[in-house]
Amino acid sequence: MSNGTISVLIIEDNPGDARLIEEMLKEAKRANFLFINQTTLSGGLEELLSNKIDIILLDLNLPDCTGLDTISIIHEKVKAMPIIILTGRVDEELAIESLKRGMQDYLVKGKIDSGLLERSILYAIGRQQVMQELDDSKKEIQDAFHRANFYKDIFAHDMSNILQGILSVAQITKFQLGKTNDPNEILNIIGIIENQIIRGSKLISNVRKLSEVEELEEPLNLIDVCSLLKKAIGNLKNAYQSHSIKITVDSHNNSIVIKANDLLLEVFENLLMNAVNHNENSIIEILIRISEEYREGLNYIKVEFIDNGIGIEDSRKVNIFTRGSKENNYVGGMGIGLSLVNLIVERFEGKIWVEDRFKGDSTKGSNFIVILPAIELRK
């Protein structure tokens, strides 16, 4: 409704009946009505494409369609639109079937007056709004249910793996107790336990952050990409002090500003951890290349994370960012890292995908590419 006026589409091929409906609604006391009349179903459907309509008054016997077929066709096109049947037939079975198929009311011509017609229209619009709100609530409940199941599955699967890892190490320690004096072996055992604890902590953190990203709309601010990357690199090196990591940043500018928030740090940290966790080389090499890219009429900042790790098979590249997929387990076995990354990047109106480090050879490392809308570039 616009400015308190209800726009009514009357699909009626009898000029006299259409005129009578208009006269009745002109006498309405609780609302103002704007009338649009079409004489065929096809004309009515075209009208719906070009005008904002609040409710349809539909005759079942039209030149191009009759009976229940009329209902089926129009309801398929506009399921969220309240529709009232206006017909000359007194047919209870037809009336019941019409309501079953989504019509809001069934009125017989010659047995209605201005008050009844106005009341029927207002009630129909109100019921349709309530139905839409119920559908929206149902969808929200279903989405919440799916999210809860997703989180439950992650904890059940990944926490079980983490605890099993700790248990295995504890059993090895018990077996080796008193049989070894090699400090390196003891340190290795302690290192495995520490790694499992870090995995568990990261899992809990990622689930919490993913939930926050889905439920909250954090404001976007001006963020310096290079400063955030420097922080992510520092955090990575502190967390993986036992690894030999060589990181090179190739950027045409020292300061690149985009519109985002601190969640962008999660993107950078997750992608950097991928490069470390899925790398079997004695020296882990990561090249971070920052450049500009123009696509689809927009300027983007392109950030590439190029590693010398184990790579990703082509068959896994498409679904690797899909939440809950097996491919998503690429991130530390957590099944959540890249879905979190993808969700955050989408919030910033950007895109993320993965390519081979060397085109055509998926075994020689990966190139995770993030593009984000450019705001400002400073030399």
Image (tube, rainbow, N blue to C red):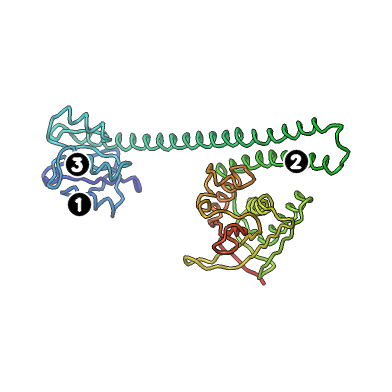
Three-letter amino acid code of the residue under disc 2: Ile
Q: Say which label, 1 or 3, has the lower sequence index.
A: 1
Q: Name the residue under label 1.
A: 43
Do the numbered discs 2 and 3 sit on residues whose CB atoms are within 8 Å? Answer: no
Mark on residue 29? none
Q: Nearer the viewer, mark 2 or mark 3?
A: 2
Give neighbour class at mark 2: few <14, some 14-19, many 20+ (Cα, 10 Å). some
Location of residue 379 with respect to 17 vertically, above or below: below
Location of residue 168 with respect to 331 vertically, above or below: above
Q: Distance between the residues labelled 1 and 3?
A: 13 Å
* Residue at 52 percent of width and 55 percent of height: 314
* Residue at 62 percent of width and 37 percent of height: 158
Measured as percent of width and height from the top left, residue 250 is found at: 67, 67
Q: Name the residue under label 2.
A: 192
Q: Distance between the residues labelled 1 and 2?
A: 71 Å
Toward the front, the furthest residue is 179
Three-letter amino acid code of the residue under disc 3: Thr
Instruction: Please give the count of numbered marks on the rendered protein.
Output: 3
Q: Say which label, 1 or 2, has the lower sequence index.
A: 1
Residue toward you, 232 or 313 = 313
Mark on residue 70? 3
Measured as percent of width and height from the top left, residue 139 is found at: 44, 37
Do the numbered discs 1 and 2 sit on residues whose CB atoms are within 8 Å? Answer: no
